Image: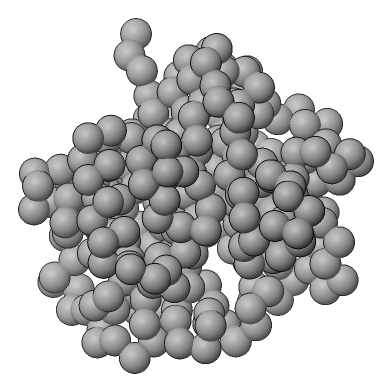
Amino acid sequence: MFEIRLLTLNTHSLVESDYENKLEYFADAIERIRPDIIALQEVNQSISADIIDKKQIVGGTFIGNIPLKADNHIFRTAEMLRERGIEYNWVWLGIKRGYDKYDEGIAMLSLEPIEMINAINLSETDNYENWKTRKSLGIKVNNEWFYNVHFNWWNDKDEPFLMQWAKMMKEVADKETVWLMGDFNNPSDKCNEGYDIIRNFGWHDTFLLAEKKDSGYTAESTIDGWKVTQKNNRKLRIDYIFCNKKRDIISSQTIFNGINEPVISDHYGIICEY
């Protein structure tokens, strides 16, 4: 038996102040912890940056219509790790324009070879110029599927969570073992909304299954989309790792929260071990 570590983080990446130092903190932590699978959301690159020659991309790839550019967050992270002797297999999916100056996407990394890649459109819109465009990126590793998700809010009038969840469920219905990792934008303390829907579908929250855990809160101050948080002094659990099977979870810990690694984003991350 051996232990597997899964990590998810909404990176905020290039949007963050003091980005270069935070990139170093992130690479340092990955070098030490070496999660087996990593799901990252809001993995940005500057629209104006130079396009990378495919010959320069080692160990990774990009899919979709948006080419990889020189300051791409995952490209730079992977290069930093490779310089330290750590080889991750990775894939980046560009999704939409962000903050009028970034190509925003999501990325998956794996220490083991990636057997298959699957990208799906979660939103009704598939428009690069529409900030509500949402996609999911899945990788198959050791016969298990790991999907990176960044869902919309429960009550959005154009792109509500429930419509996107239905598309996700249709996509994974025929897959045996599936993990969903990411920013769900649905708090665990809101009854009869997204979180309850997920669990009613039979998905297992690794936080609840964990033998060892902390508070699990991944948002403790005002962040994009949750600007009432600070006013109400409300802490949120909106980032999760779910599995469609009940697994023996050794631990679920918040990471990059100022206690367990430095804060590097407006979200904290989640790392679980099974």
Is residue 135 in view from this perspective?
yes
Residue at 77% across / 31% down in the picture? 199
Residue 17 x, y percent position in the rendering: 39, 71
Q: Taking 43 as reference, is 102 above or below it? A: below
Q: Is residue 140 visible?
A: no
The answer to which image quadrant residue 14 occupies is: bottom left
Quadrant for the N terminus, please: top left
Image location (x, y in percent) of residue 62: 35, 66
Quarter of the picture holding the C terminus: top left
> Is 18 positioned to the left or the right of 271 in the image?
left
> What residue is rendered at 57% in x and 18% in y?
210
Q: How many marks?
A: 0
Q: Which residue does the image show at 72% across and 56% down from the upper left?
A: 229
Seen as rendered, the residue at the extreme top is 1
Horizontal and vertical percent position of residue 249: 52, 17
Direction from residue 54 to residue 17 in the image, left or right: right
- The residue shown at (49%, 20%) is 251
Q: Which color scheme did the rendering employ for the protein?
A: one colour
> Is 246 drawn above or below residue 26 in the view shown?
above
Q: Position of residue 137 (x, y in %)?
A: 50, 55
Residue 259 against residue 14 in the figure, above or below: above
Q: Is residue 173 above or below residue 158?
A: above
